Amino acid sequence: MDEQRSPESPQQPSVVVVGHAARDLVLRAGSLPEAGGSADVDERIERLGGKGANIAVGVRQLHPSAAVALVAALGDDAPGESGRREAVAAGIDVSLVARRGGTALLVDLVSGEGERRLLEHVTPESQVTTADVDAAEAALADADIVVLQLQQPADALVRAARIAFEGGARIVLDGAIEGDERDELLSVAEVVRADAEEASILAGVEVATRDDARRAAEGLLGRGARVVALSVPDEGDLVCWHGGERFLPHVEQRVVDPTGGGDAFVAGIVTGMLLGAEPGRIGEIASQAAGSTVQRLGGHPELSPPVEEA
C-alpha cells in the first residue's frame, strides 16, 4: 500500500474489513411452507455473501475510489473460488482471504410478504483466525478505517483491533461481543453499530424504544466511542455522538427482504467517515444505503455513491 502514498498524488483511502465471507443461496416463494409441507420457488439467487463480504462490496460501491481489502476465509472448493472471483470483480482486494476447508453456506428463505428465515452452515474453519489477522498485519496497520464484524472469534478480533489502533486506523465495530474482549474493543472503537439485540449485549440495556436506544448509546459513548448507531425495533436508527443525535426512520416502502440492510448501513457509515461528513450526515448516508438494499431480494448491495462522492 505504501507505493500509493506518494507526495505527488492524493492518498487513496484504504479500508480493511475483517468479517465473514460465504456462499449465499436466496430462495423466494409466495409463502413459506409449514412443517411437512412444500412450496414452489419463484426466484433463486446464488452469489458471494456473508456480512464481511457484503460490507466490503458496499463500501466499494459507495466510494469507488477507496481501496478495500477483505480479511476472511473462503473454502478451498468451487463455491470458494466463485466467491473469490465475484469479490475481485467488485474491486475487492482478496489477497488476505484465506482458502481452506469448505465454504460457509447461508440460505435465505423469503416469502412474498418479506418474511424471512435464515439457515446457516458456518464451520470453525470459515471463521477468521489470529493467523489470518497476523497475515494481514501490514494492511491493518496501514489502513485508514478498519471494520471489525463481531461475529468472528474474539481472539482474532482483539488482535486485529490492537494492530489497527497502534497503526492509527479508525475502528468501526459491527455487532456484539461479550466478556473482557468487549471492553477492550469498545475502548478503541470510533464508531459502534448494533441492532437492538446486539445493543442490549454491548450496553446491558434492553432496547425496545428510542429512549432505550438513547440510554444504551450514552453508555457506549462513555466507554470511548465517538459515534454510536443503534437500531430501534420497527422504527428506525438512532445515531448519537457527544453533544448531539439524529433519528433516521426506516423507509416507508414495503421491505422485500431485510437481509443485508445492516451490512449496507455499515458500508454507509464507512463512506461517510471517508468523506469527512459530520455524524448526522454519516447516519443519513448509512440509512439511505440500508433502505436501498432491503428493497431487493437477497441483501446484496447495489449502491450508488452519495452526492459528495458522485
Image (spheres, helix red, strand yellow):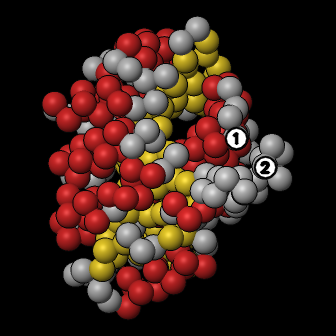
Indicate the position of residue 9 as horizontal and vertical percent values. 72, 57
Q: Nearer the viewer, residue 162 or 283?
A: 162
Residue 251 in sight from this viewpoint: yes
- The amino acid pointed to by label 2 is Glu
Report, in whole angstroms, how far the alpha carbon at label 1 lies from the one at label 2.
7 Å
- The x and y percentages for residue 233 are 50, 30
Q: Picture coordinates of residue 277 (x, y %)? A: 70, 32
Vertical relation: 169 (above or below) 245: below
Q: Residue furthest front?
A: 7
Which residue appears at 22% of the width and 81% of the height?
101
Task: Determine whether the residue tagged by mark 2 lies in a helix, strand or loop.
Answer: loop
Label drawn at residue 62 = none
Give the labeled residue for mark 1. Answer: 275
Q: Can you say whether 39 is above or below 33 in the image? A: below
Is 296 on the left-hand or right-hand side of 80? right
Q: Within the image, what quadrant is residue 28 found in?
A: bottom right
Identity of the residue drawn at 80% across and 43% down: 308
Q: Residue at x 34, y 39 (%)?
A: 166
The residue type indicated by label 1 comes to: Leu
Q: Residues within 10 Å of mark 1 (few under 14, many from 20)?
A: some
Relative to residue 100, is residue 136 drawn left or right? Answer: right
Q: Nearer the viewer, residue 268 or 15?
A: 15
Q: How many marks?
A: 2
Pick whichever, 251 or 95, lies toward us.
95
Q: Up-down: is 148 above or below 250?
A: below
How packed mark 2 is, by other alpha carbons closer than 10 Å (few <14, some 14-19, many 20 or more), is some
Pointer 1 or 2: first along the chain: 1
Q: Is residue 201 above or below residue 153?
A: above
- x 52%, y 25%: residue: 227
Q: Please tell me which residue lies in front, 258 or 48.
A: 48
Q: Are marks 1 and 2 in contact (CB under 8 Å)?
A: yes
Residue located beneath label 2 in the image: 309
